[in-house]
Amino acid sequence: MSPVGLPYFHSVTLDPDRCVGCTTCIKQCPSEAIRVRKGKARIIAERCIDCGECIRTCPHGAKKAVSDSLSALGDFRLKVAMPAPALFSQFEESISIDRILGGLLALGFDEVFEVAEAAELVTAATKGLMEGRMAGTPDAQPRPLVSSACPAVVKLVQVRYPSLIPNLVPLLPPMEVAARYVKEVLHPGESGIGVFFISPCAGKVTAARAPLGYEKSAVDAVIGLKDIYLPLRAALGKAGKKPISHAGGAGLAWAMSEGESKALGERRSISVDGIANVIGVLEALENGKLKGIQYIEALACPAGCVGGPLTVENPYISRSRLGNRAISLMPTATSRSLGCLGSLAWDNPILPRSSRLLDPDMLRAMIMLEEIEHLVGQLPGLDCGSCGSPTCQSLAEDVVRGNALETDCIFRLRETVRELAGRLLALEELKPPGLDTE
């Protein structure tokens, strides 16, 4: 259950018909949220952070992200498309941003608003936060600050590194800022406005349905980039009106690694992409090894949002394209001011998620912990994943919780078979007392 007492919502889901129980996903999941039992993978909801790593690595396409479809356009009077800047990296540089925006209008949207514009406002707000000029935020946050733009990283901190929650930048992500601007500034008080975010990742789909740091999202629907890519490419030739892009190069670059840091202009910063690399940096931060660093830009996907699991292009080709597009634009947006939106601070605090709580009763939890430690000592420590759990430690935990058997470990099973075989041989040599002549 979620902290508010509702079932966890996750965009990442499993197609059991495609799953063959190969255990590839359990080895790649950064939060140990997947198990393979009875030949099929299953996702532990309270541990999943919607990073989409299982979508990226599953060789059978059994993991997928649930998102909205273009048919949802019919539910609203005025449809506003909010493309993530990663969208522009999926097309050749010869296809202008204005033409891509025009293609969205040809698909049935009435207006477009680039999330890259909102990213520039978040950059300005972050600068104010670091300089102590941001109202509604903590006066003395611990350093370094950790970017909260990537929802998978925010959940990773919440689940695995709760001590680092105070380090998170307490600001709304660009997606939410853009949606609120559309509804509160461009169309204040109007009804029937539908805001559609075009997302490169599953994490942002989840963030629109079950946000962290704010009560309710202003985003009405999220369409996966891969789902809109082909219809949009076909619509490029039909585009009539070509709206003028308002975003600057700094906002556009947010979709790739180092883009946020460069926009911020903080030299004492670290930019890290890829969930395994993010974990390494967060562990170093938790262990007090990042002295002198003021800011960490952490992105769960390789190369940044351009490498999201819902994109279609190679992430490094995408990063090159987007970098070239950003260079050709003005550094910041100039034609429209977003400053009238008001505070960008979180509405609600983020609380730790006790995904690994063994038992609400402290005494019982301590007993279970001792049982886990004892069992870990009897397991081989190879972390092969053949048992359906990602590590020997997690198998021991699953056994103590009653979700697995010790003999799920193939090595423990072989030892048990040998012991049973020895006992059977010894029993075979025994005779009933009346027939024993020795």
Image (tube, rainbow, N blue to C red):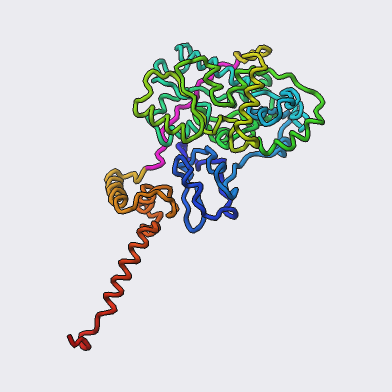
Between residues 355 and 404, which one lies in front from this camera angle?
404
Quick check: 370 left or right of 312?
left
> Percent x, y for residue 420?
32, 69
In the image, residue 355 lies in the stretch drawn in magenta: yes
Quadrant assignment, res 422? bottom left
The part of the chain drawn in magenta is: 340-356
Percent position of residue 404, x then y: 40, 55
Height in image: 68 above or below 438? Answer: above
Q: Is residue 252 above or below residue 300?
A: above
The answer to whether residue 319 of the structure is visible from this angle is yes
Who is closer to the viewer here, 227 or 261?
Answer: 261
Quarter of the view holding residue 122: top right
Q: Please, is residue 213 above or below residue 39 in the view?
A: above
User: Residue sitting at 57 percent across and 37 percent down?
Assistant: 202
Asked whether residue 1 is in view, the answer is no
Query: Total marks drawn?
Result: 0
Which residue extends farthest left?
438
- Left or right of 227 on screen, residue 141: left
Q: Position of residue 85 (x, y in %)?
A: 64, 26
Q: Is residue 237 magenta?
A: no
Left or right side of 191 for 360: left
Residue 241 % position (x, y)? 80, 23
Main secondary structure of the magenta stretch:
loop
Image quadrant in which the C terminus is located: bottom left
